[in-house]
Amino acid sequence: MTEITGSAAVVTGGGSGIGMGLAKELARQGAAVAVADILPDNARKVADEINDAGGTAIAIHCDVSDRSSIEQMKAEAVAELGTIQLVFANAGATSFMPVTELSESELDWMTEVNFKGVVWTFLTFLPDMIHAGGGHLVATASMAGLIPTLVPVHTAYAGAKMGVIGFVRSMQLEVEEHGVSCTIYCPGGVLNGMRDHNAKYRPARFGGPSDEQMQIPKASFQGNRLRFLTPDDVAPMVLQAVRDDRPFVFDHSEQRQQFRELYADVVESCFDDTERWEAR
Ligand SMILES: NC(=O)c1ccc[n+]([C@@H]2O[C@H](COP(=O)([O-])OP(=O)(O)OC[C@H]3O[C@@H](n4cnc5c(N)ncnc54)[C@H](O)[C@@H]3O)[C@@H](O)[C@H]2O)c1
């Protein structure tokens, strides 16, 4: 069991969407929260709303694609809130660049933020958790990472998110002896700020930021009737899974069937090939 009430938590990407929902729900459930984001005004706004509602929150500027920025964020969070027990590596950005046009800066942006951003956020806080004898690491991956063919024209993003799932599942084996739990959240359609603001999140060394509107290819969501939830809908569900030390948390039960059809059944049919080959 993971306790939330009375704990200190960090939420990256807490200035908008799912991260904002998590930060607010953590505060409602009695945690002190560090809202970290690459857009400091958004982080400040969320922290102010939490404090105005009687909770405890601080805002910290942080670019998770930059290790020194994560270390600086940790120093500020610990100085204000003490040892951190809960870390939500949630910051992310998206890409719908066709694979035949995929640029180095686009791929680097996706992997540095969505994959390595999660890795270095966790590895920055892990030593304190091991020293303290426990803690909980929560990664926001994606249903597009668990089922890479769910959303077409999404290669760099799906690859980075699937990488998160592989890294965290493997890491769990090494950290559980230290009382550290891991949970992977795979959102599958939550209202957010990405459609309008994704380009603003792009760090300069990857060619950003800009006010460019995100172009989503028709093929990406054709025939895929996504049911959208709100951040306030999903945040309590995620925190219950954290409290129960669950390895995964999903927010759309209907995506179980898509996981079977688009991933598990495909893998199974290829294992059938192997059995046939062996039986030859
Ligand atoms: N909304 C969905 O349906 C959905 C589906 C699958 C996965 N996700 C994942 O959920 C997470 C949250 O995204 P969201 O949907 O709430 O979108 P959002 O755009 O509302 O929030 C993303 C937040 O991350 C911040 N951010 C981006 N790059 C950053 C960086 N380098 N360093 C620090 N902060 C950075 C942004 O400023 C923003 O506040 C992301 O990891 C996203 O990939 C969301």
Image (tube, grey):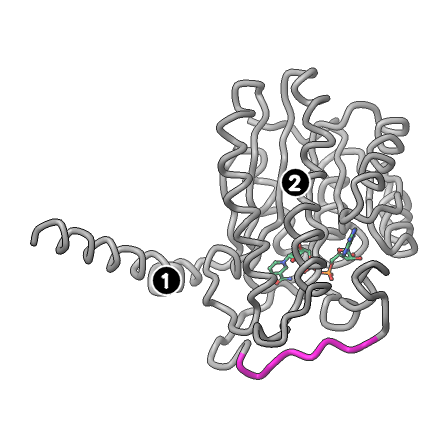
Q: Where is residue 15 in the image (x, y as percent from the top left)?
A: 81, 54
Which amino acid, mark 2? Val
Residue drawn at the location 52% of the way across and 70% of the way down: 151
Q: Splitting the image into 4 quarters, where does residue 241 fall?
A: top right
Q: Position of residue 31 (x, y in %)?
A: 75, 33
- Look at the image and tell me in which quarter the C terminus lies: bottom left
Q: Is residue 122 above or below residue 61?
A: above
- The magenta stretch is 212-219
Is residue 278 toward the left or the right of residue 104 in the image?
A: left
Pointer 2 residue:
119
Residue drawn at the location 90% of the way across and 29% of the way down: 80
Magenta stretch contains residue 163: no
Q: Where is residue 183 in the image (x, y as percent from the top left)?
A: 56, 39
For disc 1, the neighbor class at 10 Å (few under 14, some 14 to 19, many from 20) is few
Q: Splitting the image into 4 quarters, where does residue 23 fall?
A: top right
Magenta stretch contains residue 214: yes
Depth check, front residue: 198 or 17: 198
Q: Where is residue 64 in the image (x, y as percent from the top left)?
A: 77, 47
Depth check, front residue: 189 or 40: 40
Q: In this view, does 27 lie above or below 262?
A: above
Secondary structure category for the residue under label 1? helix
Q: How many labels does the image show?
A: 2
Label 2 residue near ligand 1, CB within 8 Å: no
Pointer 1 residue:
257
Which amino acid, mark 1? Gln
Residue drawn at the location 70% of the way across and 65% of the way down: 106
Depth check, front residue: 275 or 135: 275
